Image (tube, rainbow, N blue to C red):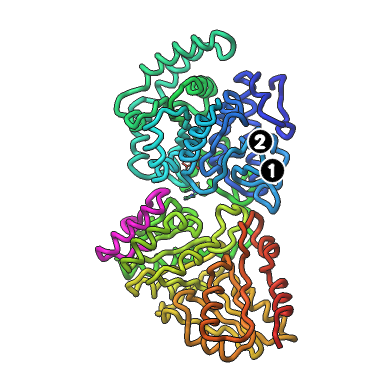
Amino acid sequence: MTKNKINIIDIKNPKFLKKMSIKELEELSNDIRKFIINKVSVTGGHLSSNLGVVDLTIALHKVFDSPKDKFIFDVSHQCYTHKILTGRANKFDSLRKTNGLSGFQKRGESEYDSYEAGHSSTSLSAALGMALARDKNKEDYNVIAIIGDGSMGNGLSYEAINHIGSIDTKLIIILNDNEMSISKNVGAFHNHLDKIRASYKYNNSKSNTKKILNKIPLVGKKIEQGISNFKSSIKKLYLKEGFLFEELGLKYFGPINGHDYNELLMYLEMAKKETKPVIIHVITQKGKGYEYAENDIIGSWHGTGPFEIESGIRINKNDNLVTWSEVISNHLIELTKKNKKINVITPAMAGGSKLLKYKELYPNNFIDAGIAEEHALVLANGMSIEGLIPFVSIYSTFLQRGYDEVIHDICRMNTHVVLGIDRCGIVGEDGETHQGIYDLTFLLPIPNIVISTPKDSIEAGNLLYTAINNNKPFCIRYSKDKLKYEKKDYKMIKIGSWEKVTDGKDAVIISYGYLLNKALIVKELLKDKIDLSIINARFQKPIDEDMFKDILTSYKNIYIYEEQTIINSLGSYLVNYANMNNYKGNIKIFGIKDKFVLQGSKEEILKELELDEESISNKILENYDK
Ligand SMILES: Cc1ncc(C[n+]2csc(CCOP(=O)(O)OP(=O)(O)O)c2C)c(N)n1
């Protein structure tokens, strides 16, 4: 053990790193890895990506002067070491909990967090914007974007590179290449990085680099000269014509070993002295320091719930239940048996969307498009036009990226594209960047679209069967929650039809998806006071006009209970419809008010939003017109 042993919990800011030797840095890396594994095993969180960048993040904080210098972590799911080094280690027990430490960079949380994200591939554009502002303001600091190889493959990154390469602004890009997106990375850019790694004989040249580096002092006056000698040696070793970024006008350094402090510190010092955009290609190992995560190729340790460290076994609460993603995936497997026109597309979420089994069974019907939501949607549209039936599995929050494609391509051309919208509603711990509470809001106004939300596995299968057998844009929405997987012979559901789940004479609750069960609990809670009818509005578009007109004439009190922002939700659609039909009764929407919904467990969030069953019962009592 070195004499300057650091107690992680006591770290207030990264200044202490400046004086540390490489041996001490290595020891710190080990301690931080253990700390992250311990904390995430209890709270859950992003594990592998964080373990991979411990050394890189420490090196960044040693070489640069944050918060003056700005670090922009792409997605920012890999910022745990950054949080630890900037005085937030003592908050890790509250990671991703209500009012706790965010799993992402948050400007309000620390002056060291210069940007915020949650969705991928925003770092390069943001970094360029900040660098341009710095130049205009005649200030002098470094802007450093840290982006993974998966996120680099997204269109937004290419758009930014296109701009960055054409101007001379000082900007540093760290390409953190671990060969993985969540699971194995895909695509031509990924293949290009593969070729670089191979052609520069990374493993062999690493030892050459070491030889050069060993001759250079890491501190003191001689460093300048050392770097300059090193630079020319390195150029001979690595730089070769034809590398994509060099061709696009960025200075490229690498690839370097992201777990070797000698290399990291030297290259970062070099980059700091550049006056033009540079990119440092750093090779890291995702999951480093935790064997299960190191050996993971499907991405199951990218994000994880609580687990036992020794065995790697996850601590699952609802063990006999499966996720909605799995239910949909199982139905897709069944339906593809009989209809090979079905093709499943995922924008880099095969694991999260539980499509790995589908991929194994039907490799020719499965496409991982990479982190490329817009592309995935237009790709699906092209496939549909040529007679296939694409099913795009996409998280509600990431569908936000593909809005124009849904309007301009899919719905305008009225094609047979099925959207499986995953993680609808409150998602919980990932917080405000990931809540699925806007998809209805932005999809409802689009002509031609069918939007549905099943209440259970059987209805999900039937809706999927209906979608596959109807030549139109068809969305099936489902949440992050768990349920029982059940299947019967598939049958068509009349598009737009609702279902009366239970009858009641006094008032009606219209709901769908996850909250429908809560509506049934509300009925039970209020049974001695108000006799409630519960409607499963399984289609949010088109609505069941016959049933709704009947409701308007039969009930004086109508409540719409949903997990969407109330501005343009099913509720507002229905209130408007009721108004147009001169409804004079009491109609109320219980949904999400106009504010971003923060992190926490789903049940806590629902309570906070007054959308839990008790709050709804109280609100109905308060708003009941006798
Ligand atoms: C627009 C968008 N799509 C999908 C995701 C889900 N997602 C989070 S991290 C990640 C993988 C990122 O890979 P990479 O950039 O290589 O970083 P790594 O985790 O490997 O460090 C994905 C697909 C996202 N955050 N944003």
Q: Which residue is identified by label 2?
A: 84
Q: Is residue 362 magenta?
A: no
Three-letter amino acid code of the residue under disc 1: Phe
Quadrant where the C terminus is found in the figure:
bottom right
User: Which quarter shows the N terminus?
Assistant: top right
Q: Is residue 117 visible?
A: yes
Which residue is at 30% across, 65% downward?
341
589 left or right of 160 in image: right
Residue span colored magenta: 363-391
Q: Which one is in front, 580 or 216?
A: 580
Please, is residue 122 above or below residue 340 in the view? Answer: above
- The front one of 17 and 399 is 399
Q: Is residue 408 left or right of residue 434?
A: left
Give the labeled residue for mark 1.
Answer: 92
Q: Are marks 2 and 1 in contact (CB under 8 Å)?
A: yes
Image-quadrant location for residue 161: top left
Q: Secondary structure at mark 1?
A: helix
